[in-house]
Image (cartoon, grey):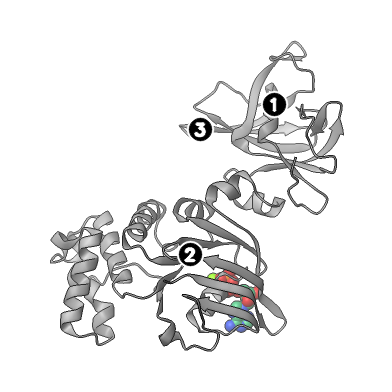
Amino acid sequence: MADIVFRNVTKRYGGTLAVDDASFTVNDNEFFCFFGPPLSGKSTILRLVLGLETPDTGDILIGGKLVNTVSPAERNVAMVFQNLALFPHMSALDNVRFPLVERGVAEAAIGKRVADVAAKLHIGHILHKPPAQLSGGERQRVAIARALVRDPNAYLMDDPISALDARLREETRVELKRIQRELGKTLIYVTHDQEEAMSVADRIAILEHGRIRQIGSPAEIYDRPASTYVARLLGSPMMNILKSARSEGGVEAAEGTIRIADKTAPADAVEIGLRPEDIKVRPWMDGRRADGVSGRPARVFEVEPLGGYTVVTLEAGQARLKALLRGQPDIRPDAMVAISCEPARVHYFGQSGGALAR
Ligand code: ADP
Ligand code: MG
């Protein structure tokens, strides 16, 4: 068992609160991701798990055992190095063997462990080749095998693929996700890339200035962000957050260009959040919206066709917002349009930015 538990852990560096009263449980075999902007405390949390730092207050448990004063070696948690590039002058096999050879593991044990990892990663048939003779995807699998060849209680990865180009990053994260599931190991993963966090993690912890703001599955956090801070971090384009006011039968935002007929809207909502993909854009005809509902028109500011999707930036009163539409709709800059959103898709936020239940 390698579940990892933080109970009210705080870590300061001088005047800086790097980790602020963090409590969480990473379950055995879970792919758990920490996500937040630079300096939000991600790497410090990993160093606390590894035992390279000790908490000022609070407890850290690994597999049910208190490890606050246990040395890094005894914790048997492995930090996977940042660089997934292979040594070009060594065969794939020697690359995979390298971390074990470096640690002086006995030859028989190396052979067994490498065979085991190679079988799980389906790379046994390419191990004799040098990296130059491998495809991009094969190279990534070999690099991951090398990263995983030790057999610790849990793996930690600190932004492991940020140095790769975009295409290779997309390939590698899929491999990582698949491999983690096949190996059945606890993995704590740090990234500053929201799409990567969403794509790989079973659960994500969102950090802000050393504080955990929300923990949940990617879908939970995306669909029910606990605050405007979290809402803005996940999603591209990001959620539109607009000042709102109660109006007859619901809520109104952006000077009447958006009207939400939602009688269940919380009375203390001061902002609404609309995901770009939830915004409907329709032509404005003869001073009326195409669907006959009253309101005011918005103006199309710019249109970005992305192939499968189109991002439309709208001017609605003093506000700018983005809608994500399927395909390539016939919408031109400066057109007047009606914008709407299903009441069930609207997020409500209160005075301090916290999400409000209906
Ligand atoms: P992240 O990995 O999210 O970028 P870090 O955990 O590296 O964040 O840093 C969290 C905060 O702690 C930052 O304000 C950073 O400047 C500070 N910090 C981290 N390590 C040290 C250190 N060794 N000495 C002093 N301050 C540190
Ligand atoms: Mg860091």
Q: Read off the residue under disc 3.
A: 309
Label 1 vs 2, first from the N-terminus: 2
Query: Of residues 215 and 44, which is closer to you in this image?
Result: 215
Disc 2, SS: loop
CB under 8 Å between callouts 2 and 3? Answer: no
Residue 13 versus residue 329 in the image, above or below: below
Q: Quadrant of residue 247?
A: top right
Q: Quadrant of residue 35?
A: bottom right
- The residue positioned 60% from the left and 62% from the top of the image is 37
Q: Is the shortest distance between ligand 1 and the CB of mark 2 under 8 Å? A: no
Q: Amino acid at mark 2?
A: Asn
Q: Amino acid at mark 1?
A: Ile
Query: Of residues 183 and 189, which is closer to you in this image?
Result: 183
Image location of residue 130, percent across then percent down: 17, 66
Which disc, if any, is residue 27? 2
Residue 203 versus residue 283 in the image, above or below: below
Query: Of residues 343 and 86, which is closer to you in this image?
Result: 343
- The residue positioned 51% from the left and 74% from the top of the image is 46
Q: Read off the residue under disc 1.
A: 339
